[in-house]
Image: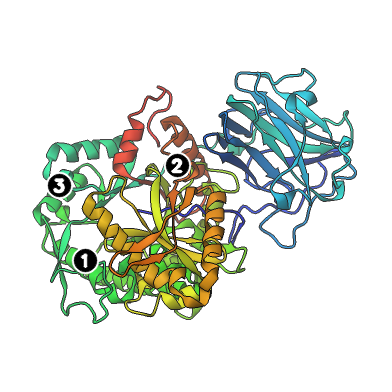
Amino acid sequence: MMRYLAMSLPVFVMGFASCAAADPLPESAAGLFVIADFDDAIQNNLGGYYNKFEKPPSKASTFLTKDVYRGSGGRSLRVRASRAEDGFCGVWMHLFNFKQRPVKYFDAREYDYLSFWIKGQKGGERFFVKLADAEWIPQEDALPIGSVTEFLASGQITTEWQEVLIPIKKFDTLDFAQMGGFTLDFDTPGEHTVYIDDVAFKKSLEVATPLTQRTEADAIKRTAYPKAMWVWSIDQLINDGAARQELFAFCNREGIDQVWVQLLYKFDPPVSLDDVPTDGLPRGVTCEIVQADQFRQLNREAHRAGIKVHMLDGYPEYTQKEYHPLPLAIVDAVIAFNKASDPQDRFDGIHFDNEPYLLIGSRDRGRNEQILREFLKLNEEAQRRVRKESDMVYGVDIPFFWDKWDSQTGQPIGGVRYNGRVKPATYHCIDLLDNVGIMNYRDTADGADGMIAHGMGIMAYADKANKAKVYMGIETFTYDPTDVWFAVGLPHELFAKAIEHNGKPLSRLSRVNGFRTQIYDDGDYIHVGIEMPANPTAEQEDRAKKTVVQIAERLGASSYPQLGDKVQRIQAIAINRFGDDVEWRNPRERVIFDADTNTKYAGLVATSIMLPKITFAQESPDEIKAQVDAAEDFFSKYRNYAGIAIHYYLTYKKKLEEPRSEASGAMR
């Protein structure tokens, strides 16, 4: 299960993006330049993106809807805003492609009006309009110019389409030769739903914006793909026939034809994942499937229900070469299980969810490439064994962001040389494996930070390579705010050395003494901490103190004399940057004390927050269906698209049990 990295913009999409905007279109009528009609791509005619913005507890969403439009066909942009007394929310649109360099802003000097059409769901909705030029854009802000009601002839939003006409030349502090975008800021508390269509620049009030005409594409209903689903909690299912039948009935009802089911197993001799085996794993380590007959029964019943079963497992440590014998032993055990079973009792595939980006060493670029190389080596060998010894398929889960360019380094985040070629690990996996599950965890289909934007480059590459099938994963789980206790950390160069030396190589661990680690890079220093239990027992509290001491001894600024009087400054910088990061709350100092040596280390505690945009956990079943259908409508254009994968059974089932309208139906 993915430990969440909410990738912040700017991150640039690599090549192979199939829906990049074309060159700017000519004026569609005299004195008119249409920026966006929202009928197809998520980029407008200037290459610009749009996206929601929000600060909890306020929340916003965008959605290209086929149900509301100007004219006889097409789409409009539905914007929903739940504005609380605190926070903020709204939507922005750029008039340039922020993923390309150099930036080319829009020259609007020959136009007098910015126009767009608006319709309210109930009427009376309100928001503030802001405009941005090249000076405002780097500040991630815009010039307030007035309430939308000031630019409507009727003076208010109604349930009928109306044109918003903004006399841009009135705001002469803006540089109209370098216009960057506009923002709709919902500043009035309450629930607001509006539809936006046909954004354009006009030379005069007399210029009309043409209506969209219905096309043949509007009438096409795309094929509904079957879905896959992660199933982690297995103990009850393999021992309770009623629970299994409930699972299979749920899958049939929701269009799920494949489940990735947690395997139960044990190693002989036993192996701990808390310590890197510096002397190597015990020779001849083997894996035994626990309750093998119950798994045969589960597989048999699933097949009768028309559902395929892929064995599921994963740990970040498995990706590293010292540990490769363990996952390969699992692969061998499943192959042997199938050979010893009747056809209807066999697994249909093997699926690993190993997530190497959770290893401590992944935050060092040089070490990360080695981590990814070993991850690929493991999967190539696992795939070889599966193809040679079975008729199963083999796949892995990978994050959506490995193929994105890091704007700071100018390199793909998951770039790695493997088999003589440098490319993102995502693309190597597509080249090597039967299937991949992209953890494309966002709660909107469209927009600059939506499922389509993050997945379209991957799908384009998959079609070009024509090898692995690609599942697009969605999240329905959320975790409670979690305190993380950090040792005040080290500058990048010192961190890179410290994780490899002075004892066992911490670079290869994602947990220490059973505690999951989190790593925070504040831009200058890297801080490593452990997740604290919500209500720790005395034993857990004592073990946590000893664990964070171990981290501070190796990776804490206080342990390095050369940092000397800089430690307090490093701590202050960290607390300030945690405070500015939306994924963290309430950063505060906390001394790390080693009672055995009477030594104090600089530390801090901050509360980790799972951002709402990562999961559908806060959305209604109707909204999940709408967003997933919209994403699938786009991804179904690609021949290597395999369907949506849902994380995971228990949380998704609970979500669908919430009240829903009769019209929503199953998510299919």
Q: Which residue is mark 1?
A: 330
**Would you say residue 375 is visible in this rendering?**
no
| Label 3: how many Cα within 10 Å (few below 14, some 14–19, many 20+) | some
Q: In screen coordinates, is 207 left or right of 457?
A: right
Query: In the displayed structure, would residue 68 be above or below residue 245?
Result: above
The residue at the point 32 percent across, 77 percent down is: 504
| Tag 3 secondary structure | helix
Give me the disc on residue 294: none
The residue at the point 66 percent across, 47 percent down is: 49
Q: Position of residue 331 (x, y in %)?
A: 23, 67
Q: Earlier in the sequence, mark 3 or mark 2?
A: 2
Q: In screen coordinates, is 577 left or right of 246?
A: right
Q: Which residue is mark 2?
A: 223
CA–CA distance between discs 3 and 2? 33 Å
Query: In the displayed structure, would residue 591 be above or below residue 360?
Result: above
Q: At label 1, which amino acid type do we have?
A: Ile
